[in-house]
Amino acid sequence: MEKILIVEDEAKLARFMELELTHEGYEVFIAEDGRKGIEMFFEKEPDIILLDLMLPGLNGLEVCRRIRKESDIPIIMLTAKGETMDKVMGLDSGADDYMTKPFAIEELLARLRVIARHKLSRQASTPKNIITIKALEIDTDKRSVKYDGNEIELTKREYELLIYLAENKNIVISREQILNNVWGYDYIGETNVVDVYVRYLRTKIDDKYNVKLIHTIRGVGYFIKDED
Ligand code: CA
């Protein structure tokens, strides 16, 4: 079921859209101001956002910009009549579309169908995301890793570490960079966690298949080598 987040401070309008969209089979969440909207975006992971422009506190443009930093989720801006300048700014800020209030629900449903069609055609045309390094094959769509066709079971963290090294293949990466990117800036703990996980990966890939993919540069960091 597609999830729609409505960020709208006019309770009546929000409730009306909720009823109609629920009736159409969408799962609907309502946030009554901008801050709540951003919170619910992270919490509910919606598929589409209907975002009012004039909101108390954080306005719609700011909400749109902040969400755009995180995601390319379709955003339809809801503007009041006559906010022509704002319409343009709304699209500049990364909104996909806008609608002027008041609008007929049929118009909103039509826009949602357009978004759904775009999404389908995007999915159909997306090439498979496969990273290949020698006989190692990582399919990032399926999150599967194979060596010479043999499936390798990795934990979530091992997989993320491998992806990070593979996406930066042939480039030496410091422990700190790895920590920041794989464990996150807020990681508190032993920095040798990186060495420990590199060892796990070596056991599962290098040692098992008798190859040398993961290289150590003493005192600097690690890298995956694609060339001989
Ligand atoms: Ca408003």
Image (tube, grey):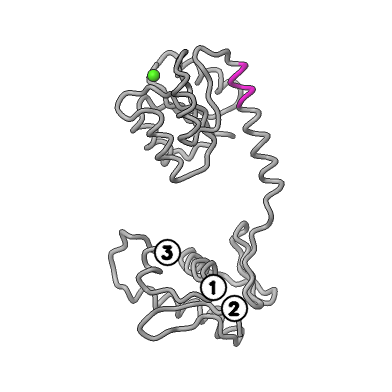
Using the image, tell me which numbered label, if any, was put on residue 182: 3
Q: Quadrant location of residue 93?
A: top left
The residue nearer to you, when weighing 210 against 185, is 185
Query: Three-letter amino acid code at disc 1?
Result: Lys
- Where are the magenta residues, as a range? 106-111
Task: Give the residue pinned by disc 1.
Answer: 169
Q: Quadrant location of residue 184?
A: bottom left
Quadrant of the image for the C terminus? bottom right
Instruction: State whether the magenta stretch is mostly helix, strand or loop.
Output: helix
- Which tag, 3 or 1, sits closer to the chain's start? 1
- Which tag, 3 or 2, sits closer to the chain's start? 3
Q: Measure the alpha-carbon separation of dots 2 and 1.
A: 7 Å
Quadrant hosting ligand 1: top left
Question: 10 Å neighbourhood of mark 3: few (<14), some, or many (≥20)?
Answer: many
Query: Three-letter amino acid code at disc 3?
Result: Val
| Residue shown at the point (45%, 46%) measured from the top left | 70
Query: Three-letter amino acid code at disc 2?
Result: Asp
Above or below — where is 162 with respect to 45?
below
Above or below — where is 16 with respect to 49?
above
Callout 1 secondary element: loop
Question: 10 Å neighbourhood of mark 1: few (<14), some, or many (≥20)?
Answer: some
| Residue shown at the point (46%, 20%) measured from the top left | 79
> Left or right: 130 with respect to 157?
right
| Residue shown at the point (70%, 73%) measured from the top left | 149
> Left or right: 198 with respect to 152?
left
